Image: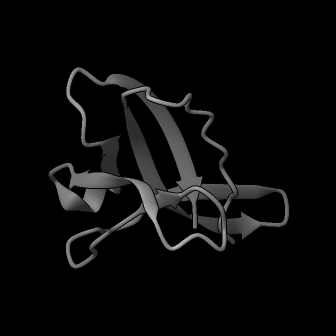
Amino acid sequence: MADITNFNIGQGETFKILVEIVNESRLSPSSSVNIPQDLTNVSFEGAIRESYSSEDIATSFTFTKIPPYASGSVYINNKRTNARTRSEKIRL
């Protein structure tokens, strides 16, 4: 199951977020392990709109997979430079 992650980014802010995508594997009802998702054949795209029904894109993101791709790590950032960096984990 995917986690919902909220990113609070102020208007006009530049950002760069390190995300580790993992699969949660249950070993038992009380124990689990996170296994990195292999991103070798995976591509990403993302954008923000003013509202759900808006057709105009307010900003778009770039995604940079980090080798080795089996690590499940990817940077998400907007197209501006000098971005601040944060880290998040997302379970799939």
The residue closer to the viewer here, 10 or 63, is 10
> How was the colour assigned to the protein in this rendering?
one colour
Image quadrant containing the C terminus: bottom right
Q: Does residue 83 sit above or below 64 in this rendering?
A: above
Q: Residue at x 67, y 45 (%)?
A: 6
The location of residue 28, given as percent across then percent down, is 77, 67
Among all residues in the image, which is located at the extreme bottom? 41
Q: Is residue 5 above or below residue 87?
A: below
**Spot occupied by residue 44 in the image (x, y as percentages of width and height):** 32, 68
State the residue in front, 87 or 13: 13
Does residue 57 sit above or below 83 in this rendering?
Answer: below
Residue at the spot x=24%, y=33% of the render?
Answer: 80
Residue visible at 46% across and 66% down in the picture: 56
- Residue 47 lies, in percent from the top left, at 43, 60
Q: Quadrant of residue 42?
A: bottom left
Left or right of 75 on screen, residue 6:
right
How many numbered tags mark residues here? 0
**Residue 33: quarter of image:** bottom right
13 and 6: which one is in front? 13
Can you say which quadrant of the picture contains the N terminus? Answer: bottom right
Image vertical order of residue 15 relative to residue 37, above or below = above
| Residue drawn at (30%, 24%) of the image | 83
Q: Would you say 1 lies left or right of 81 here? A: right
Q: Is residue 28 left or right of residue 53?
A: right
| 45 or 36: nearer the viewer | 45
For this orientation, the residue located farthest to the right is: 29
